Amino acid sequence: MKLTRRDFLKISSAATAGLALGGCTTMGFNMQPVQEQAWRLRTQDAKETPTICCYCAVGCGILCHTDKRTGKVIYTEGDADHPINRGALCAKGAATYQVAQNDKRMTKVLYRAPYSTQWEEKSWDWALRQIAKRVKDSRDKSFTRKNAKGQVVNRCDGIASVGSAALDNEECWIYQAMLRAMGLVYIEHQARI
Amino acid sequence: MTNHWIDIKNSDCILIMGSNAAENHPISFKWVIEARKSGATLISVDPRFTRTSSKADFYTALRSGTDIAFLGGMINYILSHNKYFQEYVARYTNACFIVGKKYGFHDGLFAGFDPKTRKYDKSYWAYELDANGVPKKDYTLKHPRSVFQLLKKHYSRYTLDKVSAVTGTPKEDLLKVYELYSATGKPDKAGTIMYAMGWTQHTVGVQNIRAMAIIQLLLGNMGVAGGGVNALRGESNVQGSTDHCLLFHIWPGYLPTPRASAATLADYNKKYTPVSHDPLSANWWQNKPKYVVSFLKAMFGDAAHAGNDFGYGWMPKLDDGKTYSWLDLFDAMYRGEFSGFFAWGQNPACSGANADKNREALARLDWMVNVNLFDNETASFWKGPGMDPRKVKTEVFFLPCAAFMEKEGSITNSGRWAQWRYKAQEPPGEAKPDGDIMVELFNEIRSLYAKEGGVFPDPILNLKWDYTTQGKYDAHKVARTINGEFTRDVTLKGKTYRKGQLVPSFAFLQADGSTTSGNWLYCQSYNESGNNMARRDNRDTSGIGLYSNWSWCWPVNRRILYNRASVDLMGRPWNPKKPVIAFAGEVQDGKYVTKKWVGDVPDGGWYPMMNPDGTPRSDTKYPFIMKPHGFGAVFGPGRGDGPFPEHYEPIECPVEKNLFSSQFTNPVAAVYRTQKDVYKTCNPRYPFVCTTYRVTEHWQTGVLTRWQPWLLEAEPQLFVEMSEELARLRGIQNGEKVIVESPRGKVEAVAMVTKRFRPFMVQGQEIHQVGLPWHYGWVWPPDGGDSANLLTPSAGDPNTRIPETKAFMVNVRKKGV
């Protein structure tokens, strides 16, 4: 049988888990086969998707295991094939399952009106239309065709943007494209701080 | 990073200073350990004894904000003990250049300083040129105005006594570090530096790194395996977001954002394209006009053409001499200059220096959009500490977004590897990928302008915006635009490329509109051979861990930058055991007759500088191809605060004088003047030096990690770490609640009394330092404490304007006293 590095790690970690439990054996039960079976059941039908960790810029590989029936990520682990981390992860990277499954995640568009004391739930359509109106209004009022010296500058001085190093490259690129097309010059993000 | 993570294993000596890799970049430490297994020496220099220090062969401490004094002492040691790599320094660095007669340095100020504007006139630091306009050189390094001799003179002032009195580092410890590190000045030895925000977040941040770059050049550590200047970047895609320039001063690919004085594309090219009159200088930036036109074509598509300056007039221009950086942005917001604000994937109410100023600034907006995964202190600022929602006018839109495993796209790590990642599940509830939010929002904005008209609608209506497939954002379409394509059939280098075909690499980009490229540095990332960022071949054929077929790295998959400095003038590796590249061309009669390099993608594929018989070649180029003159910059005349790093005290410090000169702080540091910008030096109310840092279990403001039970359990709340001596002085017990206050704000924290901080002897006086992590905020968890950035000052480096959050002054007292 030809084992990949990843297979090997899977088997060895399952064995380690079994041994640890084996140490706790009481009343003559050997938990090891049960544990190995439980391990297999957990991920055997799951789809493996490689991704890269969302925290620091080491760029470690993570494998997400997605349950094919529910479509939910049920387990995350270090990608043993990745040349930088070779399956290892730090505490944060190892906890990314709790990013995927977290009941504190925000799932609705929220709006807070001026001087209001609370959030209201809104639809995407409503929010994007309202934001677009605010952008146009602010831009049209603050747009500077020429600066104090009379030089053409064609910029929007009334809107600023920060973010984000948490975006993908492609998102960064289209974000800068839309901001610059709108004429923004106050464009900054995490790299400056 | 000029090198990359795995390359750390090739090092003979690793200096970790200004970072704490073991805790903040834990997996990078895997490669530090690999290096140590092969006999490398690990040095840790940090005000606090960290987990990095615990694994080091040698550890010593310095007071925060005195790195230039520490490193200046090392430069002095290297020069006075002849530890530098003579041939490398003479032939590959600008140490041989002759500086003009106007240059001078007196009592902490370089020539050209204007006290009224607090700015330098950099023309005082210009090189002396020959009749052709090429810098004059003295390869013997003996000319009294050579960079080498000026360097020697400048750092002869950095004596052990003086450096120790300023840094608080014992003299014998300084000597030990200098000896260990300068041992890498031999041709076959490599030393590397791993630094992070501990060096950048200072009013001398750029010069901290310049000082180390000088050391790396003097020791011949640039371009080689196990060497380089390596910034450990802190966010998964902060390299990519920098490359794509979500920053005021640059367009994608580090093209300068135009100033108002550059009215036309021709003005722009003239102003920003460097010129070299030396035929041996590649001066790579001479290609800038090709990259700019290709970028504008990517922005505006067919609407950009030679007849309208490729849409150059549609792009916003900055006023000359004005900065629009983070600190300036929040200063302007605080002064009420903005009506609207996007905080997209960021939590500035906790992440920015002087957080209370920023929080108040948010209340002066008409509207704000925050895009995030979790509730945070920015989205909910209107109900935060000290805010009365009924008095806050700002309308807030919170848009929930997808997490990283809920979308597809690439991110670029610190080693410049762009790695593709895939979607593993749908976002929860109504959350959407950021790309979809952007596409839909801009569609709304554009349709408003199309319908109603408005001020200067042209750039909005003409922006190329075709990034969807079946109505959904498609990262592949953007990746193609970033790479670029041919806009018509073109024949280049004897080969014909069809309209619509992806450009193979940036060497094919043109200034005539026949190519597009959203970012020239990423040209090759997604071309006709496929999505190179998605490659997963993890075999290493280089022997030095380049892994060249895993993902893709910029530029042109070159894994180690400036690698032509890793070989001698004849193209032979300085270290034959760890070659990055080597020249393998055929030789006839002592001359190279065919051109072939093996190893990494060479930094330009020209012939070596010399033939095997020692005769120079005219068809070669100097190795530092991104510098106009082709040489590594020991002398840096482009910086705003001087061509050599000089020690100045932080804006807030515990000493009354700077022992190196009567210039107390950086004369051109960025400071601000609202009532919220308060700075206090040598004030008995704030007697202790303070720094901020991070812990392994949390990330940045904690906006993701504070919501994860596993991580929160490990690090549940804000603490302030202090020495046993300071705790005794203030009657504080380990675990007690204390108040930490600066001139700008205060936080409540748990006292963590450790042996990891020790008092410093600075200028004959005992100085205490404390530190606290900046991961917390009032939204979550309850009683977890608030942001350490409530304490930090809004003062910044004059070049980058990065705030000085690693050295400032505080008081610590028991709660209720």
Image (tube, rainbow, N blue to C red):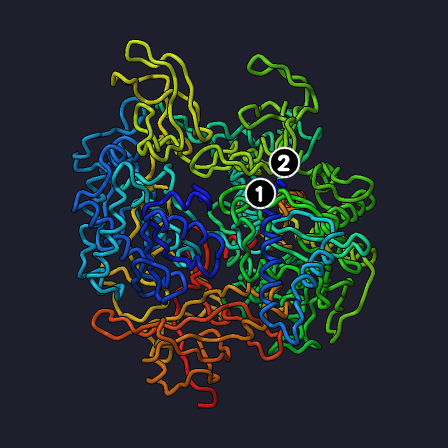
**Are marks 1 and 2 in one subunit?**
yes
Residue at numbered disc 2: B482
Amino acid carrying label 2: it is Ile
Closer to the chain start, of discs 1 and 2, is 1
Is there any visible trace of residue B33 in the rendered image?
A: yes
Q: Quadrant of the C terminus of chain B?
A: bottom left
Furthest-bottom residue in view?
B817
- Residue B425 percent location from the top left of the image: 74, 53
Front in this rendered view, residue B558 or B512 = B558
Compared with residue B143, is residue B357 higher up or lower down, i.e. above or below? below
Locate residue A3, reporting x and y percent: 61, 43
Q: Is residue B303 above or below residue A84?
A: above
Identify the image quadrant of residue B599: top left
User: Residue B308: image x %, image y %?
Assistant: 65, 28
- How packed mark 1 is, by other alpha carbons closer than 10 Å (few <14, some 14-19, many 20 or more), is many
Residue A75 quadrant = bottom right
Corner quadrant of residue A170: top right
Q: Whole-percent x and y of residue B305? A: 66, 26
* Residue B360 visible in the shown view: no
Q: Residue at x 78, y 54 (%)?
A: A71
Q: Which chain is indicated by disc 1?
A: B
Q: Residue at x 63, y 47 (%)?
A: A168
At 36% from the left and 42% from the top, the residue drawn is B227
Residue under pointer 1: B244
Query: Does the CB distance between marks 1 and 2 fall below 8 Å?
Result: yes
Q: Say which of A19 and A43 sits in front.
A: A19
Disc 2: host chain = B
**Front residue of B236 and B270:** B236
Amino acid at pointer 1: His
B289 shown above or below B674: above
Quadrant that contains the N terminus of chain B: top left
Classify 10 Å Cα crowding around label 2: few (below 14), some (14-19), many (20 and above): many
